[in-house]
Image (cartoon, rainbow, N blue to C red):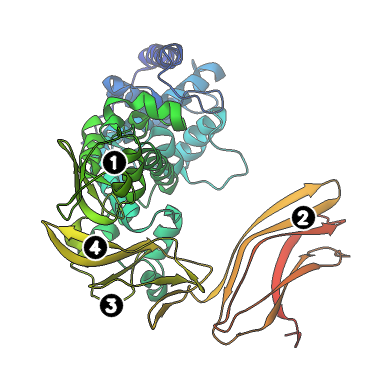
Amino acid sequence: MSKAVLLELAEYRREVDRLYQLIQERRAEVTMNGTARLKEGRVSFREIELGDELLPLLNVEFSTHQEYGGQSVAGVNSELRQKARLVSLAALCELIKNEYQGDFWGLYQEWTGKIADSRIYKSIIEKACQEEGLMRPEEDRRYTDTLIAEAGISRKMLPEVIELFAIYWKYFYPLDIRELFRLIKGSAEEQKRVRILPEEAEKLKVIVERCKEFPTAIAQVIGNLSSLMVALSEREDLQPLDLVERPERFEELCGINPLRVIRGAVALRGLAQRIASTVTPEKFRRIVLTLPIGTRVILPSGRSVGTEEAGDVPYFGRYRIGNANYLVMPNELLPPEDINLYPDHHLSTLGNRVIYKAKDEFLPLEGDAESPIVPRELWIEGRSRGFIWFRNRLFDRAIRVGKQQLYPDEGLHWHTALWRQGDTLAVELLGVRLYDAKLTQKEIDVIVGMSGQAAPPDPTETWFTTDRNGLGDISRALLPISGAAPGEVEISLRNRRTGE
């Protein structure tokens, strides 16, 4: 049975005016007190609370959809229709914030008793989004994604989003979260790139499926939480619980208020508590550097040392400074017990991470050079558990430990950007990398040109040489194309010697 009701015309007009005015007042209030973050000069619906008016808002939306949204309804002029569209947009956003748990249009039908149709898409959502600057006329229509990006993550989905971020930070950062979603849903070969521990892999698949309707909102939240974690790791004066207790400090440092990203102190505190006792070696080093001369630090091995030796962070494990305990691990969300799950003397890949574990010291190489990340001995409860090396996967060179080698994924990988000055178009190639075991020690041309023109300009090119393993790269190249007219930019590779 639906919850929204159809309003009589007189009541409909009163409610549209009342709720429209309420929206303006609450927008003005958060702007005046500085608690809102303006986006392109407007206050988004995620920044204001209208949950106390959810049912009246939905009554207006339902009545607009069913009865009063047309162009020639007696007693409803264009001004009232525009106000009603804004109120309807607010209604859908509040429904998301308070009730959404996946399948938005199923939720809409539950509250209104009606199946969404072209009238709500075209006459209400699309026009309201364009009037609010959320959707340009030429854009693809991703209605649910647009609505959830505007409303923010539903309170009922915050635990799952926090869990998604925890898995992402542990295994995948800085991989783009949208790329992660694509790989999880991709071919068996693509899914190998996101292989993690089975229990967490199953949990991740379930969460990704439930979040599939709102990739834009998820990307925003994961990106903002990642920035907050980076700020935490880089500042010795910040503690995880400051996410909840001193959110303004993060806003000063990186322009992000944690309580606007996750609008639920309980969920945010839960994340903070999960990482409260764990720091990376880099952060622990910064903490030690702030200690007074003469301070003693108890190492995980039990030995007491001064700050100079402790600042080298020789071990993974639990350090003690006075009454404070710090668990130093390669990642804030990697518990010591996980280390037992990895085999000794094996280059293991989990997600975007590489880990190697051995009882004795070893020397990891990146390409032909020694890795800047040193293996550290892990101590748990006063006992050595061997040496651990942990880092992000590399996409431009091989990793070697002893006779074991881990090469980047085969194929061609690059990022591009376009620059234009006058009639000259320049293609910027960033991080071009080719790995193909069949193309060892070859000179490879990278050719950039244009198609779709009657007289396309001459292509420009640069080149690189692959090594004995078939790996070659260009860190950056800027290739100008003079006189380029509208068309498609084409990038291709060619063996410099054979022309193939």
N-terminal label among 1 and 3 = 1
Q: Residue at x 70, y 80 (%)?
A: 443
Q: Amino acid at mark 2?
A: Ala
Asked if labels 3 and 2 touch by Cβ distance under 8 angstroms, the answer is no
Question: Residue at horizontal 28%, vertical 58%?
Answer: 204
Q: Amino acid at mark 3?
A: His
Mark found first going from the N terminus, 4 or 1? 1
Frontmost of labels 1 and 2 is: 2
Query: Residue 253, located in which quarter of the rendered image?
Result: top left
In this view, 19 is above or below 374: above
Calculate the distance from the C-alpha at mark 4 to the C-alpha at mark 1.
26 Å
Q: Which residue is mark 4?
A: 202
Viewer can see residue 90: no
Q: CA distance from mark 1 to mark 3?
A: 51 Å
Q: CA distance from mark 4 to mark 2?
A: 44 Å
Disc 4 or 2, which lies upstream in sequence?
Answer: 4
The residue carrying mark 3 is 345
Where is mark 2, residue-wise?
A: 426
Q: Quadrant of the C terminus?
A: bottom right
Residue type of the residue flagged with mark 1: Leu
**Residue that badge 1 annotates:** 107
Sequence order check: which comes first, mark 1 or mark 2? 1
Question: For the residue carrying disc 4, how many other residues have a C-alpha within 10 Å: few (<14), some (14-19), or many (20+)?
Answer: few
Q: Secondary structure at mark 1?
A: helix
| Picture coordinates of residue 352, whole percent (x, y) | 39, 62
Mark 3 Cα shell of 10 Å, populated few (<14), some (14-19), many (≥20): some
Residues at marks 1 and 3 touching, judged by CB atoms closer than 8 Å = no
Percent position (x, y) of residue 341?
19, 68
